[in-house]
Image (cartoon, rainbow, N blue to C red):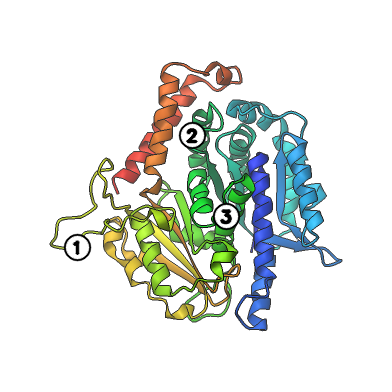
Amino acid sequence: MSILTVQLGQCGNQIGFEVFDALFSDSYCSQGLCSKKENEAYQASCKERFFSEERNGDLVARAVLVDMEPKVISQTLSKASQAGRWKYSQHACFCQKQGSGNNWAYGYSVHGPRHAESIMNLIQKEVEKCDSLSGFSIIMSMAGGTGSGLGTFITQKLQDQFPNSLKMNQVVWPYGTGEVIVQNYNSILTLSRLYRSSDALLVHENDAIHKICEKRMNIRQISFSDINQVLAHQLGSMFQPTYSAEGSFHYRRNPLGDLMENLVPHPEFKMLGVRSIPQMSENSLAYSTFTWAGLLKHLRQMLISNANVEEGINWQVRPPVSGLPPLGKTPFTRELHLNTSIANLVILRGKDVQSADLGGLKDPALYTSWLAPVDAFNVWKTQRAFNKYEKSATLVSNSQFLVKPLDLIVGKAWNMFASKAYIHQYTKFGIEEEDFLDSFSLLEQVISSYCNL
């Protein structure tokens, strides 16, 4: 089954390119560490999901590119065609001459209604090229105007037009220090609307990815391109084919459907995060060896101590043991907080994958009391290595990991709203104060629900 990617705004288009490039590079990599037959099955499965094939054999990304300014889309198209490995369809792009000026209301209330019909027609044409549609991966930023405002509007349109297809929004969370003065307004308006129309929000925090570039990749001067490549690596490690069942050598047909089934057991909890290990520079990789026991020990502690990078792991946080006082199960203000999960999916790729012991991630103490670990934890595997790593593990988690950053953004937005700062920029395009209050109310409820796990 195929996944159609919708790339929105500058951020969405630049990340989208890196994602397709990472998927292609991995699929056609000679270091898959598996048999030729298995490699061909893996390539065919990836191709069905993310690429269509022209008569001349060229691979075309299953994607629609949308931006309100032409510059980024033309750069993205030429970057793909210059590489000569795969390309975008020239007929699956929509751009205009005027951006959204980092104003969510302009993207949502002006560009949205004005251009939705043209954009939805392009999406419909791409959907018709798929033999079978698994759903949509919508890549967008929260901070700006086009990705966030128009992206939210298009997600709602997708919900109306394709109610039976799954929608996963790849949401890029802005730097805490801020790129845009109204980014907190844009963020709360985006998140609250998406919570109603999307099936899952996979959140990528710029600060966390920046830390990976700095600490793990040893990059001195970190660019957005570096950040996008790390993000693409994480998405690739999540979406590339895995076996459909333990002991099976057939690949999953419906990756989005399986992800949602494993990770979103209740519509009130749909915030997902992804962590991948190892992630390191090629120079370091040459001198490194990994064991499944070591990788999974680190991944488990990253989960329970809510660390995005291995350097940030707090080894003091431990789940409660029956009969002993709960260590780490303390309020959010205390240091040792155990990051409680609703559901976790671990994806293992590489050598001796069947020997990996996942007992530590099945511990009931890691999960909310209303889901049994047998329902809350799943594992996907393949012997096929990913992206030059002999062994790699990816954790996709629905947990309390976003409570702090979400609370921070809501708090900052509320402080601005209380003094009516910049509200006029939104009301002149039809977003009223009631819309803000509605967003605050919904997100406070989301925070409360996750806190009470």
Q: Which residue is the extreme one toward the left?
A: 323
> Which residue matches tag 2?
177
**Which of the two discs, 1 and 2, labels the residue nearer the N terminus?**
2
Q: Amino acid at mark 2?
A: Thr
For marks 3 and 1, give the one nearer the viewer.
Answer: 3
- Near mark 1 (Cα within 10 A), the count class, few <14, some 14-19 or many ≥20, is few
Query: Which kind of residue does numbered mark 3 sit on?
Result: Val
Mark 1 and mark 2: Cα distance apart in space: 39 Å
Above or below, 154 against 383 in this view is above
**Secondary structure beneath disc 1?**
loop
- Give the amino acid at mark 1: Val
Provide the residue designation for mark 3.
Answer: 230
Whether residue 311 is visible: yes
Residue at mark 1 = 321
**Looking at the picture, how far across and down is residue 9, in whole percent?**
66, 39
Q: CA gap, disc 2 to disc 3?
A: 20 Å
The x, y position of residue 350, in whole percent, is: 53, 75
For residue 209, above or below residue 242: above
Question: How many callouts does the rendering have?
Answer: 3
- Dot 3: within a 10 Å radius of its alpha carbon, few (fewer than 14), some, or many (20 or more) residues? many
Q: Secondary structure at mark 3?
A: helix
- Marks 3 and 1, how far apart at CA: 36 Å
Q: Are marks 3 and 1 in contact (CB under 8 Å)?
A: no
Task: Tell me the residue at 61%/54% (across/down).
Answer: 229
In this view, 301 is above or below 421 = below
Label drawn at residue 56: none
Q: Percent from the top left, x then y, of residue 383?
A: 54, 77
Front one among 1 and 15: 15
Point 60% across, 67% down: residue: 387
Q: Nearer the viewer, residue 284 or 67?
A: 284
Let me know if residue 95 appears in the view: no
